[in-house]
């Protein structure tokens, strides 16, 4: 167990790190942020900040040596340089290795008995055409690495679309569309001894590839499929010997839950847990990596809606403070660009 006054290292300087840092402070810990970007909303609420490239071996090892444990707040941290500090890291970097490559991720889940959307690796125009002919259209072409919130993705409506598309200079994967009734996520926390707790699964709605809302109750379409989805999530966490908060996203379909993707971190669809659960995802991640007892994950509200504030939505968000049971979180970002997550609002009904 890491005693109060210890230092938690945070790889990445975004809003997820900011919210974890605030929980860490509440539990008596210091936070040291490491990020290559000078602007860091996580560093604003932390005690220490190292701004250096991921490939700066001396800076990275010096940072880790100053920390009692190191975690990350987004999954696109390059894995290679982390070999030098993997004895400090929780979760283990194998979770990043799996989640960073969409093809590896789907094969990993498939081997555990999960059902992903139909997929095929694509490294050439010929392979793309063959994938569309075999899987069908519509579908979506995605870069295997990087890309999130709709970035690095191209919708393909027909074989003609596939013939016209110019492939990026990176490995890709083609996925067939899934007919679904709802989207939902399973968020769990696992401690060092392997104990797991789940939060209730929200119904998630995306707009332009970005999460717009997460709501509870999630409805029958979701609740009927939560248990098999949780069973798969438990297998994933155990297979990775995972420590911390882990998220799996699913489609609820007539045939059961279809795996979409995994996020080895706290997740946007779990922001509601700050006000809506006995213990938030952010606090429980800190508890898990520091060896503290896990907190209760039960929902403490009868109804919850979390809504993301994207781009200029945040400019007028303070007006919501006049609403009863409305909780505003702004992330301190300086520029309200289109498609950029600037904050969120959670509305709670007790």
Image: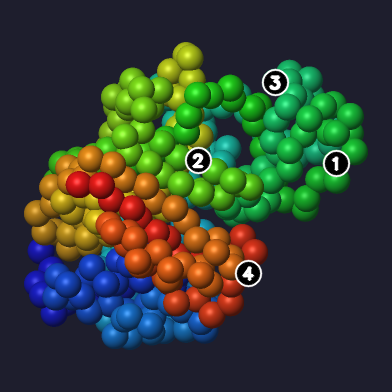
On the image, numbered disc 1 is attached to which residue? 165
Give the side of residue 291 with respect to residue 347, left or right: left
Judged from the image, the secondary structure of the residue bearing numbered disc 2 is strand
Q: Nearer the viewer, residue 72 or 322?
A: 322
Vertical relation: 304 (above or below) 32: above
Q: For residue 345, what is the image quadrant? A: bottom left
> Extreme top residue here?
255
Give the number of the disc on residue 135: 3
x 63%, y 47%: residue: 208
Q: Earlier in the sequence, mark 4 or mark 3?
A: 3
Q: CA distance from mark 1 to mark 2?
A: 28 Å
On the image, numbered disc 4 is attached to which residue? 337
Mark 2: few, some, or many residues within 10 Å (few <14, many ≥20)? some
x 85%, y 41%: residue: 165
Judged from the image, the secondary structure of the residue bearing numbered disc 4 is loop
Give the side of residue 326 with respect to residue 183, left or right: left
Image coords of residue 106 (percent x, y): 52, 33
Q: Earlier in the sequence, mark 2 or mark 3?
A: 3
Mark 1: few, some, or many residues within 10 Å (few <14, many ≥20)? some
């Amino acid at each position: 167990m890491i005693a109060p006054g210890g230092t938690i290292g945070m790889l990445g300087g975004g809003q997820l790190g900011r919210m974890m840092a605030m929980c860490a402070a509440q539990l008596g810990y210091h936070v040291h942020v490491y990020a290559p970007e000078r602007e860091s909303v996580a560093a604003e609420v932390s005690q220490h900040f190292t701004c250096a490239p991921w490939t700066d071996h001396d800076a990275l090892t010096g940072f880790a040596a100053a920390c009692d444990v190191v975690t990350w707040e987004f999954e696109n941290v390059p894995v290679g340089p982390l070999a030098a500090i993997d004895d400090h890291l929780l979760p283990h970097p194998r979770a990043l290795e799996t989640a960073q490559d969409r093809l590896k991720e789907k094969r990993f889940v498939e081997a555990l008995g999960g059902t992903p959307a139909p997929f095929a690796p694509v490294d050439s125009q010929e392979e793309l055409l063959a994938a569309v002919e075999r899987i069908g259209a519509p579908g979506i072409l995605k870069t295997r690495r990087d890309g999130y919130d709709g970035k690095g993705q191209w919708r393909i409506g027909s074989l003609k679309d596939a013939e016209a598309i110019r492939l990026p200079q990176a490995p890709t994967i083609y996925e067939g569309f899934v007919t679904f009734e709802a989207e939902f996520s399973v968020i769990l926390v696992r401690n060092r001894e392997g104990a797991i707790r789940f939060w209730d699964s929200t119904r998630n709605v995306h707009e332009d590839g970005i999460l717009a809302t997460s709501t509870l109750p999630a409805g029958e379409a979701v609740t009927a499929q939560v248990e098999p989805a949780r069973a798969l999530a438990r297998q994933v966490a155990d297979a990775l010997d995972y420590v911390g908060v882990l998220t799996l996203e699913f489609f609820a379909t007539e045939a059961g839950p279809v795996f979409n993707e995994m996020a080895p971190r706290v997740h946007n669809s779990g922001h509601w847990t700050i006000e809506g659960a006995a213990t938030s995802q952010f606090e429980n991640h800190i508890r898990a990596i520091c060896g503290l007892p896990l907190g209760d994950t039960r929902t403490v509200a009868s109804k919850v809606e979390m809504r993301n504030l994207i781009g200029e939505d945040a400019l007028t968000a303070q007006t919501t403070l006049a609403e009863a049971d409305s909780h505003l979180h702004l992330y301190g970002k300086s520029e309200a660009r289109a498609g950029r997550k600037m904050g969120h609002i959670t509305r709670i009904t007790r």
